[in-house]
Image: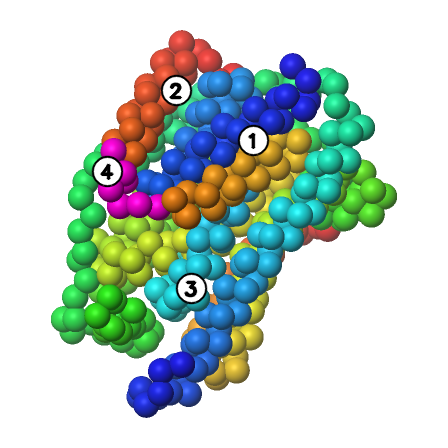
Amino acid sequence: MRAGTPSSSARDDERVLQTWIGRVLRAGVVSAALVGLVGGAIYLSRHGTAWPDYATFHGVPAGLDTVHGIVRGALEGRGRWITQLALLILIATPVARVAMSAVAFARERDGIYVGVTLVVLALLLYSFLGGRL
Amino acid sequence: MTILTATLGIAAVSFGAGLLGSLTGLGGGVVLVPLLTLVFHVHLRYAVGAALVSVIATSSGAAAAYVREGYTNIRVAMILEIATVIGALAGAYAAGFVSPRLLAFAFAVVLLFAAYRSLRPQQDHSTTAAADSLATRLRLNGTWPAPGGEQPYTVHHVPAGFAIMSVAGAISGLLGIGSGALKVLALDQAMRLPFKVSTATSNLMIGVTAAASAGIYLRRGYVDPGLAFPVMIGVLAGALVGARLMTAARTRFLRGLFTVVIVVLAAEMLIRAARGGFQ
């Protein structure tokens, strides 16, 4: 921490936020990679023969396309669902970063940026949930 | 082809894309979709789903490093994320109604734009001239850790930056890429942030932009874990290794090589689409 710089408390708040953003992003990516490797190992050990047909588009099996379905399948120990959970953790990582920024701006009593951050967060949640879980 | 060999093959190619993307600073995401569709014959919709997820992984990894070093302008990112997220939602919705063939054409155009941008010299447009009143009211001006110590800079043309960012968001949502080239263009040339601050701030924004589209992609069934995970882990590993290998001397040659690869892939996509491929 640089001592003696002007408005050092505002700068300290900024540094704390930066540190936490860095930690959340790194933790999200690392945990997604680890969970995915576990799921991938289960998937490959059980279905190691036929390569699925990705040349024509037919979506994904039911339950792999909703937050609720992914969590339920993962809890049952199904490899593809655990791998999809890993991708869900990854997608949720930037969302967590935005949520954390909202808290930090609120602590700084920075009204404009609390508003801005909440708008972004609402749009992201809309994309994720689209009116249903 | 068994699942195991296909998975390893896809992870290996993705590793190469992540490595080159990181060494050249151009990002690996833009070559993934052409590689998956042209080499592995994956349908465009699955390919964009897998590429978008990998973009979140690499940009978050890079953003984590930049933000801790103090390069990132978090307020600029927050304001512009409104634009990129709205653009991304619109783009991702539109992607469902546009034919894969038309998307392939659009993709080739974006590839050529990325190649053109990569050939231009990187120039710093930063300034300490009086900031725009809007930038001052939003407290966007900042400092960055330059080699000689903390350097102040001012922010300009916020509305223009906002407009370019909404286009960047829409392209990201439509094609499943980070559109980092367009984001850096807005930050660096329109808003005149220092080059390193532009790159760092763009990386932070790419994750949020991609997450907005990814939610819609996931619900539409574009994200298949059997394909998206090997791509993501391969690109991520490639980007990490690339960040360690980084040496200035080889970068110019690699940028040239990567640009040639991008142009060849763009041409191949155009030819396929013109012949009625990508159904």
Q: Is residue A97 magenta?
A: no
* Residue wearing tag 4: B252
| Mark with earlier residue (3, 2) | 3
Disc 3: which chain? B
The residue at 23%/38% (across/down) is B252
Chain name for mark 2 = B
- Is B249 within the magenta? yes
In the rendered structure, which amino acid carries the disc numbered 3? Val
Decide: marks 1, 2 in contact (CB < 8 A)?
no
In this view, the residue in front, B261 or B93, is B261
Q: Amino acid at mark 2?
A: Met
Q: CA distance from mark 1 to mark 2?
A: 22 Å
- Image coordinates of residue B93 in percent, x first then y, are 52, 40
**Nearest to viewer (mark 3 / mark 1):** 1
Question: How far is the residue under mark 3 from the one under mark 4?
Answer: 26 Å
Q: Earlier in the sequence, mark 3 or mark 1?
A: 1
Measure how far apart labels 1 and 4 are at the Cα level: 26 Å
Chain ID of residue with mark 1: B
- Residue B67 numbered tag: 3
Left/right of residue B40 with respect to residue B205 in the rendered view: right
Magenta stretch, overall SS: helix
Q: Secondary structure at mark 1?
A: helix
Residue beneath the point at 25% across and 61% down: B193
Q: Amino acid at mark 1?
A: Ala
Q: Are marks 2 and 4 on the same chain?
A: yes
Residue contact at pointers 3 and 2, CB within 8 angstroms: no
Q: Please tell me if label 3 and label 1 are on a single chain.
A: yes
The correct choice, above or below, for B45 with respect to B167 in the image is above
